[in-house]
Image: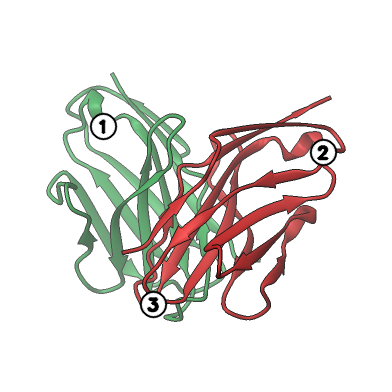
Chain colours: A red, B green
Amino acid sequence: AQSVTQLGSHVSVSEGALVLLRCNYSSSVPPYLFWYVQYPNQGLQLLLKYTSAATLVKGINGFEAEFKKSETSFHLTKPSAHMSDAAEYFCAVSEGSARQLTFGSGTQLTVLP
Amino acid sequence: GAVVSQHPSRVICKSGTSVKIECRSLDFQATTMFWYRQFPKQSLMLMATSNEGSKATYEQGVEKDKFLINHASLTLSTLTVTSAHPEDSSFYICSASRGDRVVQPQHFGDGTRLSIL
C-alpha cells in the first residue's frame, strides 16, 4: 500500500527566503510522485511530477523537487518565496497501474512580508 | 493546458434535496475521472473512481446509493448527492486524467462547496 507523510502542517517563511516543504512516501513499487498547490476555495493545480526520469524535477512558479530513493523523500523547494506562494501544498503518490492518488495531509505555507 | 470544469462552484440547499455536480474535461478525453471530498483544513479523500461506460468504483465507507456517479461520455462525469443532509456539507472536487497511462497527472476542477441547511 502507498502512503504519503508531509512533515509540518504549517510552514512560515519570510518573503525572499528559501521554501522547503517535506514529503516522504511509502510504496511497494517505484512510485510516481506529484506536488499540487491549492488556493482557498479552489481545486488543485499541478506544480510538478516525478515519473522515473530525472530525479530533480522542475515545475511551475520556480518550484522544484528532488526524488531521493534512499530517503524515500520528494521534498519541494523554491529558492525565494513570494507572497503569492502562500497556499496549501499537497504531496501525492501513485503506484503501478492503480492510477489513484494518495495525498498527504497538506502543508499550509505562509509567506511573511 | 488541460482544463477541467466543475459546476456549480457553490450550492446551498435544504436538507432532503438532491444535488448534482458536473465535471467536464474541456480539451481532452478522460476515460477516468475521480471524485474527492475535502473537509476543512484536511486533505482530499478519494470517494470513487468513475470510468466511462461502466459503473463507478467506490472507496470503502462511501455509500454508492447516497453518492450516485454517472460517466456517460468521455468528457462528462456527474456526482449526485441524494437526499442531502447537513453532514454531507463539504467541498467536493473532481479530477480527470488523460488516457490510460499512470504517468499522466490528474487535472482538477475548482471544486464545489456544498452547504446543506
Chain letter, disc 2 residue: A
Q: Give the Cα distance between marks 1 and 3.
A: 32 Å
Mark 1 neighbour class, 10 Å CA radius: few under 14, some 14 to 19, many 20 or more: some
Q: Circle 1 sits on which residue?
A: B88
Q: Please indicate whether residue A89 sits to the left or right of residue A97 in the image.
A: right
Quadrant location of the N terminus of chain B in the rendered image:
bottom right
* Residue assigned mark 2: A82
| Structural crowding at the residue carrying mark 3, measured as other residues with C-alpha within 10 Å and reported as few (<14), some (14–19) or many (≥20) | some
Q: Give the residue type at disc 2.
A: His
Give me the residue at 80% from left, 55% from top.
Answer: A62
The residue under label 1 is which amino acid type?
Asp
Q: Check residue A96 in the rendering and tell me which mark sits there, or answer none.
A: 3
Count of labels in the image: 3
Please identify the quarter of the rendering in which residue B99 is found: bottom left
For mark 1, give the secondary structure. helix
Dividing the picture into quadrants, the one containing residue B113 is top left
> Measured from the top left, where is residue A69 in percent x and y?
55, 70
In whole angstroms, how far apart are the C-alphas of marks 2 and 1? 36 Å
Q: Nearer the viewer, mark 2 or mark 1?
A: 2
Rendered residue at 56%/39% (across/down): A107
Residue type at mark 3: give it. Gly
